[in-house]
Image (tube, rainbow, N blue to C red):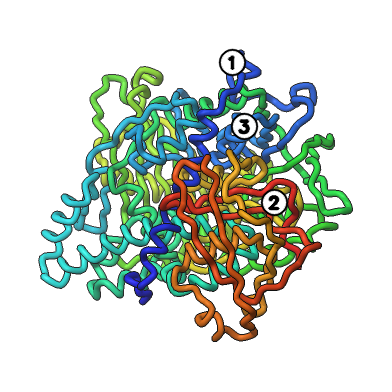
Amino acid sequence: MTNLNSASSASLAIAASGATAWLLYRSWTSWTRKAVCPNETPSDDPTKQGFSTKKVPPNLDVIVIGSGMGGLSTAAILAKEGKTVLVLEQHDIAGGNLHTFTENGYEFDTGLHYVGGDIGNKRSPTRKLLDYISDETVEWEPMDDDYDVAISGDDEYRFCSSWTRLKERLKISFPDDKDKESIDKYFDLVRRTVRDRFPLLLLLKMLPERVSDVCSWLLDRQLGIIKMTTKQMLESVTSNQKLIGVLSYHYGDYGETPDRGAFLMHAIITYHYRSGAYYPVGGPLRISESIIRVIEKWGGKVLVRAPVSSILIDHRNRAYGVVVKGKEILAKSIVSSVGSPTTMTKLIPESHQSMVRKQIDMMKDENVASNISLMSVFVGISDPDGSIKLPKSNYWMHQSWDHDKNMAEYKQDHLKIPLFFISFSSAKDPTYASRHPGKHAAMIIGACSYDDVERFKYDRVKHRSSEYISMKEKWQEIFIQVLLDHFPELRGKIEYTEVGTAVTNDYYLGTHRGAVYGLAHTPKRFQQRWLHAKTPIKNLYMSGQDICCCGIGGALVGGYMHRPSRQPPYEVGQISDPAPPVALTIGNQKLLVPPNAVESLLPRLVRSLHVHALSQFSGSRIATEVELDVRVSSRVPEVVEETRFVAVDVRVARELAILAEVAYVIGRHVLIFPQRDHADVIE
């Protein structure tokens, strides 16, 4: 097991706070920027503006492909920073997993069922990130205090909005002294993983790839927990397999059972709901509507029925536009939020796929590619007299507490669903009853194998074969029975049902093989250092949940991690005596680093870094010690005291370009800014 109490914990605390600080800092600097909104007249229905070339704004700076949370957050940030932005969505309504649909008078959500992150608190980081891109127009309704109910057979465990009370409940259910001690260790492990390790991972994703490679290598021991599965970490805390099953009840939130899923992702989900859960007032569509109005307010546009068939890339490997319905639309930068598999295998032309061959090959790895999809059953419940009282909680029904065994049995028999998730959006949204009187909406989610339905993907939607319809009817019967077993009062009240499978996800949400969570959330996925915003294609960037992690919150943070618009808010880290870039060689890695980046990045992340430690690495050579005086501009809010650094294996490279990005230490935070007019690393 990774030693979380390593001697470098102080350095990790600095790095851990840095990524979060940078995200909030970027929001704050943009928020306080004085600018004039070019368009104060919003459209009537911002989520359903059909594509036409006449609606495309002139002189586009950025085209964003996809209008899910990742794409919309990126677009809103860029628009508020003065960029002219166009968002293109293949569906007939914008929002991705935020969109809702209405049938027979019932409104159903599709992808957002609850949000944590203490989003009901306007001072929480998650709320601040969302408020900035929505102009504070989205309100949140608290769910029941017991926001999740985990059930297997006669066992029922209620997860509440207070870790103190939750631990007390678990200790009553698991009274053995060893189990009580394990419960305390578990929650402490989750807290330290998310607060210390996850921000460090975000920070590495914001660095240039080569710098990230070296820092990941140097911090390999500290990042060891990223390589661990949920099962491995929980078994290091307790030998009680039932307790492990109960603690990992929510693996469906990221689609990986304990023996395959990353403990990091498990910890993120657990920590995310430590203060309870919330639902957007007015439904999830309210979020996309609010963000789109912000984009329009700043001169951008979001157009639907606009399927991008290809990204335009010139002979110098620079993206310069997209093709939509046979028409070329040009822009200075392209941001894709539709996932790495779709972007790299479908949108990048074959003539340029050699640039991303490493990524394409890696996404074929079974531990990087998602191996399961989800099926949804939408249920309309008639309640004309308002007598039905449904909970504002989610219900998780498991075949047993051995989730790995359940999944193995499902792979042998696809009618034996390992996990069901039940949610009542009509109970969670306080406006639902007034908007849809006498009606309730339920959603049941379970596993779906793409192989079962792949052969139907080219059939016309809503006109697929009788075989497909028969399969859906069998699944629907199973799902509805689970609903009625736990909520018998709904028997005879069901008025509408519809089933969405993995191919439904592909058609409406633009997923790849029905994978609503994107790439697999396994340890190997989180070790892929190429999974960041910048791609090998110049001017082509990524956004969304593949960049960070799954879920609305993960896509939101992924949207803030895009790169085209980063501008340094002021000059920092001035070198007292301008020096040429330094070629730093560690092992077989060679980097061209400006002296101020060397000084601020490596020693601050790893305080134990020094010449003697590096001398043991294969291939490294100790050169003459070179001391650099670094002074920080007085315009930085918190001035850092002067520091000195001993450079290792120094070679002066006067002719070569320096890194596009540099890390600066301000107080306890590490912030990343670009240096203007400099190229990327050159080997």
- The three-letter code of the residue at mark 1 reads Asp
Mark 2 lies on residue: 343
Q: Can residue 340 be seen in this snapshot?
A: yes
Label 1 element class: loop
Left or right, residue 7 beside residue 360? left
The residue that appears at 57% across and 46% down in the rendered structure is 572
**Residue pushed farthest right?**
315
Q: Which mark is residue 81?
A: 3
The single residue placed furthest to the front in the displayed view is 577
Lower position in the chain sequence, tag 1 or tag 3: 1
Which is more toward the observer, 94 or 203? 203
Q: In the displayed structure, does residue 85 sit left or right of residue 113? A: right
Q: Earlier in the sequence, mark 1 or mark 2?
A: 1
Residue ID for mark 1? 44
Q: Nearer the viewer, residue 108 or 80?
A: 80
Q: Is residue 239 left or right of residue 423?
A: left
Residue drawn at the location 45% of the way across and 23% of the way down: 105
Q: Nearer the viewer, residue 625 or 42?
A: 625
| Numbered disc 3: secondary structure | loop
Relative vertical location of residue 560 with respect to residue 239 in this rendering, above or below? above
As helix, strand or loop, the secondary structure at mark 2 comes to helix
Percent across and percent down for residue 528 are: 58, 65
How far apart marks 1 and 2 lie (CA) works out to 31 Å
Amino acid of disc 3: Glu
Quarter containing the N terminus: bottom left
Q: Give the CA separation, mark 3 to mark 2.
A: 25 Å
Question: Residue 178: percent from the left, percent from the top?
Answer: 15, 72
Q: Residues within 10 Å of mark 2 (few under 14, many from 20)?
A: many
Residue 571 on image: x %, y %: 60, 43
